[in-house]
């Protein structure tokens, strides 16, 4: 339209209005999109090293339970998640930290000294002392947390999605 | 873009150009800028609807979360301050433009025959707009909001005879509480907006049907 030999007054105004309208649409529309998707962009993984006490307080060869909580903030809401792990120390001070969440459907397993197994109460899964599946439905061994020893203190690496 | 061949096809079935002509190509007398105040109000109302819907994405009308959810909108969400700011100032501006629009109609005597019903729906629109302001003011659930509504509902409670009942009906009980917040929220996002949309429909139908009055002459 703007290229035609004689631009009418009406045509000119229409073009200007259409242009101004588009600019306004973008200026208003982009912030609105940013506003709507903002929580998706801000959600980031958080990780922390959780101190779990002196390593030598954990008995040798016996998985020992340790619990802690983590607070997560979602928008205006604070959620406290509780974690419980089993710490297994061997004679050479190698440490394994197992999640107590069953790899089947997420119930809490507990260690039974009599059979030296972690047993899940939900569908009777048995894991051996190193987390491997002995029997039952779980598809894989118990999850493990990364850990390190700092000045004799056990530290557990927790990554939250 | 609807192509040059598509448009006549659609128009024949939908009658778009007829609607366009009725709304935009209608006859108007020679008027001045004061006659744009109704349209300005209409624009502000549309803006309030859009920004209000956006705010409702994050706002929570509960006594223990309302304040926090607004803090989150202001500090946690991209452009939250902008959306809330527009809604806040738009509300104030809309009350002003409605009022000025009414004054222009009054001073040009445009409320007379045959426009009495346009005027009446206008009065109801003014009241509903004030209702939006009154109910919206409580929603941030901060000290200012709480005490403003305490005072506002008490004033309504001063009506002789039925005042106590009005006060309890507004607050949903004897005191300002979560019940008050929930009913103000409902009024603010559902009841008043639907009332306003319906009234604007009648109001604008009449404006288009009757046409705009011209500016009165000296010895009319
Ligand atoms: C949400 C509020 C309102 C909206 C969106 C609105 C919208 C409009 C629009 C777009 C017009 C066309 C002419 C003009 O803009 O001046 C109009 C005319 C009119 N309005 Fe409103 N209005 C509102 C509130 C009111 C109020 C509070 C009153 C009076 C109490 C009122 C009384 C009238 C009358 C009588 C006319 C006809 C004027 C004439 O024919 O010259 N309106 N309104
Ligand atoms: S959840 Fe543990 S066995 Fe099913």
Image: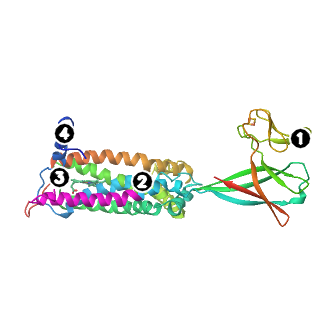
Indicate the secondary structure of the residue bearing disc 3: loop
Mark 2: few/some/many CA within 10 Å (<14, 14-19, 20+): some
Residue placed at 18% from the left, 41% from the top? B5
Q: Nearer the viewer, mark 4 or mark 1?
A: 1
Front: mark 4 or 3: 4
Residue A102 is a magenta residue:
no
Q: Nearer the viewer, mark 2 or mark 3?
A: 2
Kindly state the secondary structure of the residue where label 1 is placed. Answer: loop
What residue span does the magenta drawing correspond to?
A1-30
Q: Position of residue B168 (x, y in %)?
A: 51, 49
Q: Is ligand 1 less than 8 Å from the beta carbon at label 2?
A: no
Judging by the rendered image, the residue that carries numbered circle 3 is: B112
- The main secondary structure of the magenta stretch is helix
Task: Give the quadrant of residue A49.
Answer: bottom right
The local crowd at label 4, few if under 14, some if 14 to 19, many if 20 or more residues have their Cα within 10 Å, is few
For residue A125, above or below residue B61: above
Residue A2, image x and y in percent?
16, 59
Distance Cα–Cα, label 2 vs label 3: 35 Å
On the image, numbered disc 4 is attached to which residue?
B11
Q: CA distance from mark 2 to mark 4?
A: 34 Å
Classify the position of ligand 1 by quadrant: top left, top right, bottom left or bottom right. bottom left
> Where residue B188 appears, x then y in whole percent?
43, 51
Quadrant where the C terminus of chain B is found in the figure: bottom left
Q: CA distance from mark 1 to mark 2?
A: 60 Å
Residues marked 3 and 1, same chain: no
Q: Are marks 4 and 3 in contact (CB under 8 Å)?
A: no
Task: Please say if the residues under marks 2 and 3 sit with CB atoms less than 8 Å apart.
Answer: no
């Amino acid at each position: 339209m703007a290229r035609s030999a004689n631009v009418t007054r009406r045509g000119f105004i229409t073009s200007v209005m259409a242009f101004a309208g588009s600019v306004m649409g973008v200026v208003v529309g982009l912030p609105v999109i940013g506003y709507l998707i903002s929580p998706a962009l801000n959600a980031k993984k958080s990780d922390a090293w959780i101190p779990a006490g002196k390593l030598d307080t954990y008995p040798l060869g016996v998985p020992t339970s340790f619990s802690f909580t983590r607070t997560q903030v979602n928008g205006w809401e604070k959620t406290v998640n509780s974690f419980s792990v089993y710490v297994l120390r061997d004679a050479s001070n190698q440490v394994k930290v197992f999640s107590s969440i069953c790899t089947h459907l997420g119930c809490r397993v507990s260690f039974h000294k009599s059979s030296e197994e972690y047993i899940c109460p939900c569908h009777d899964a048995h894991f051996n002392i190193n987390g491997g599946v002995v029997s039952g439905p779980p598809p894989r061994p118990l999850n493990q947390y990364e850990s390190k020893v700092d000045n004799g203190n056990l530290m557990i690496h927790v990554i939250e999605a | 873009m609807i192509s040059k061949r598509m448009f006549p096809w659609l128009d024949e079935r939908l009658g778009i150009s007829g609607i366009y002509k009725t709304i935009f190509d209608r006859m108007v007398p020679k008027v001045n800028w004061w006659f744009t105040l109704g349209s300005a109000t209409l624009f502000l109302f549309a803006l309030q609807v859009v920004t209000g819907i956006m705010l409702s994405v994050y706002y929570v009308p509960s006594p223990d979360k309302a304040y926090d959810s607004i803090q989150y909108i202001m500090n946690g969400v991209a452009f939250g301050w902008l959306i809330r700011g527009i809604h806040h100032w738009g509300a104030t501006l809309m009350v002003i433009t409605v009022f000025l629009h009414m004054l222009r109609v009054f001073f040009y005597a445009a409320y007379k025959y045959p426009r009495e019903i346009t005027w009446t729906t206008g009065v109801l629109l003014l009241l509903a707009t004030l209702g939006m302001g009154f109910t919206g003011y409580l929603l941030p659930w901060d000290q200012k909001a709480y005490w403003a509504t305490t005072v506002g509902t008490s004033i309504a409670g001063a009506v002789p005879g039925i005042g106590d009942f009005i006060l309890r009906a507004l607050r949903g009980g004897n005191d300002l509480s979560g019940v008050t917040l929930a009913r103000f929220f409902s009024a603010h996002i559902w009841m008043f907006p639907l009332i306003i949309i319906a009234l604007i429909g009648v109001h604008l139908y009449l404006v288009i049907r009757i046409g705009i009055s011209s500016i009165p002459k000296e010895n009319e």
